[in-house]
Every structure is written in structure tokens, then in C-alpha cells.
Image (tube, rainbow, N blue to C red):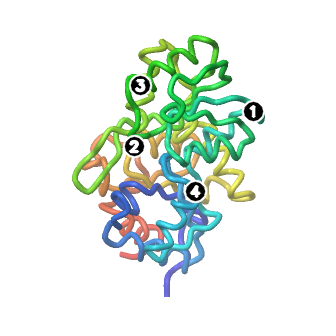
């Protein structure tokens, strides 16, 4: 029988922790099951803004991980700072488009409506493979004409089984450079994402939470934004714990679960 875990809520990154491009990291599925069996709530907190919420839930479900009501994405965080009725130029994937519309804003997708005419209240940016010079030009025009620049996240890379690829932060950096405007970033490690997590876990003190992730600059700083412990895993973008401010270090999520469950 599992021991009572030392965290009532385990906030778990997805890419580099649970999977790499939806290929499960060995031991991760069992680790989540063991934590839940012992009484921990596992909430998935991802800076992926490309996939829709239902796609994330379905992908986890296909691995045998129920996730309904337990997923928070950076697309949701970006949408949380928009005003209903605003007109938004979306430079991002389906997940970002869907959340902008769910917030009651009008989503004009840059790579579908080329040369879209303003005015725009905001330009919202996330990972998308359609990014090109014309998308960059449209974003520049919108920001120069007064649109707020919002980034779902600033992660420069995205881990895959064959190595990292450019992430949404690389796209955002190009738009920031072109416009000369620093974006308001909403995903981990920033406050809008923290506000979503707190709303999802009412009544849970931060001393009963732990954030598990593979990126100290993102997941570690997010833990500090929340005020909770940080568990670093070495299964994603970080190969060594040297110089990292982490409360728990393990090779994978399996090792983090062992630590929280007091397994020697």
C-alpha cells in the first residue's frame, strides 16, 4: 500500500516529464497512478498552447491517465487577460484560437487571413508551424497601431524524442524584436498561470503543493511564483541539477513520486 504523500497537489509539466511528443517517458504513467492512489491530486500544467484542451485530455487518456478538469495550459492563461469583445490577431495554433474565442474575443488567425486589417486590441502569440515573414509583418503592423502584445509562453525550445525544436518563445522573440515591444507573457512562470492554478485548487495551501518540471527557468521559477516546492526531473531539457535551485531532484517523474511517497 502506498504511504500518504507529502504533497496533496502535484503540479506536473507534460513535455519532458510525462512524455516527449506524446511518447510516454518510462515510469511516468505508473508514477501518476501511484500518487493518485495515495491521495494526491495530479494537475497537469503545460506551456503548450498549440493543442486544444480536449486534445491534451484525450492524449493523456490514451495513455491511461484520466485528466478531465486537471489540465491548465498557457493558452488558457493568455485568454485570461483578454477582454470579452476584443479583436485579437492570433499568431498561434488551435489551442490558442479556441481559448481566445472561449474568452469572448474575436479571433483573427494571422496565417489564415493574410493581410488582415486592423484595428486589433491584442496580438496573441504561441507556437505554430505556419509562422513566416507575412505573419511577422501582420503582427508588427498590429502592434505599431496600438495592439497589446501577449505571449502565451516564452519557452525557446520544445523537447522531442529526437531533440529540441524551436518553441513558441522563439516566435515571440522574433515579434518582440521586430516591434521593439516587450510582450506580456502569461504562461509559466508568470502570474496569470499561477492565478489559474490557484483557482483550480481552492483551499490548498502552497506548502501542500509541489511543481514538477524539467526546466528550471520555467517550472522552477513558476514554483517560486506560487511559493511551493520545485521538483526537477532530468528526463527533458535539463541534463544536470548542478546550480539549479530545486527542492527535489530525480531522473524522472518516477523518482519524484518515490520521494513524495517515502519510497526508499
Specify whether 179 is left or right of 254: right
Label at residue 216: 2
Label at residue 261: none
**Comparing labels 2 and 1, the label whose residue is closer to the camera:** 1
Specify whether 252 is left or right of 94: left
> Are the residues at dot 4 and dot 1 in contact (C-beta closer than 8 Å)?
no
Q: Secondary structure at mark 4?
A: helix
Label 3 vs 2, first from the N-terminus? 3
Label 2 vs 1, first from the N-terminus? 1
Measuring 55% from the left and 44% from the top, which residue is drawn there? 74
Q: Disc 3 versus disc 2: distance between alpha carbons? A: 20 Å
User: Residue 81's x, y, as percent?
Assistant: 68, 34
10 Å crowding of disc 2: few (<14), some (14-19), many (20+): many
10 Å crowding of disc 4: few (<14), some (14-19), many (20+): many
Asked whether the viewer can see residue 226, the reply is no
Q: In the displayed structure, would residue 39 be above or below residue 190?
A: below
Circle 1 sits on which residue? Answer: 83
Amino acid at each position: 500500500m502506498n504511504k500518504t504523500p507529502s504533497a496533496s497537489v502535484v503540479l506536473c509539466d507534460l513535455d519532458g516529464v510525462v512524455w516527449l511528443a506524446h511518447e510516454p517517458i518510462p515510469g511516468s504513467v505508473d508514477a501518476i497512478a501511484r500518487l493518485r492512489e495515495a491521495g494526491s491530486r495530479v494537475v497537469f500544467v503545460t506551456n503548450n498552447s498549440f493543442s486544444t484542451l480536449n486534445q491534451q485530455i484525450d492524449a493523456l487518456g490514451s495513455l491511461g491517465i484520466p485528466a478531465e478538469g486537471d489540465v491548465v495550459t498557457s493558452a488558457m492563461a493568455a485568454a485570461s487577460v483578454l477582454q470579452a469583445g476584443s479583436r485579437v490577431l492570433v499568431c498561434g495554433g488551435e489551442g490558442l484560437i479556441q481559448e481566445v474565442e472561449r474568452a469572448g474575443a474575436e479571433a483573427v488567425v494571422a496565417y489564415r487571413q493574410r493581410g488582415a486589417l486592423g484595428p486589433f486590441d491584442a496580438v496573441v502569440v504561441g507556437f505554430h508551424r505556419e509562422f513566416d515573414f507575412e505573419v511577422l509583418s501582420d503582427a508588427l503592423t498590429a502592434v505599431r497601431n496600438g495592439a497589446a502584445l501577449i505571449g502565451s509562453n516564452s519557452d525557446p525550445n520544445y523537447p522531442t524524442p529526437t531533440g529540441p525544436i524551436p518553441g513558441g518563445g522563439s516566435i515571440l522573440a522574433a515579434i518582440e524584436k521586430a516591434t521593439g515591444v516587450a510582450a506580456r507573457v502569461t504562461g509559466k512562470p508568470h502570474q496569470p498561470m499561477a492565478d489559474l492554478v490557484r483557482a483550480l485548487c481552492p483551499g490548498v495551501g502552497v506548502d501542500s503543493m509541489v511543481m514538477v518540471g524539467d526546466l528550471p527557468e520555467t517550472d522552477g521559477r513558476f514554483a517560486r511564483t506560487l511559493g511551493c516546492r520545485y521538483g526537477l526531473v532530468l528526463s527533458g531539457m535539463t541534463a544536470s541539477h548542478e546550480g539549479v535551485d530545486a527542492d527535489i531532484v530525480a531522473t524522472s517523474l518516477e523518482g519524484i513520486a518515490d520521494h513524495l511517497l517515502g519510497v526508499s
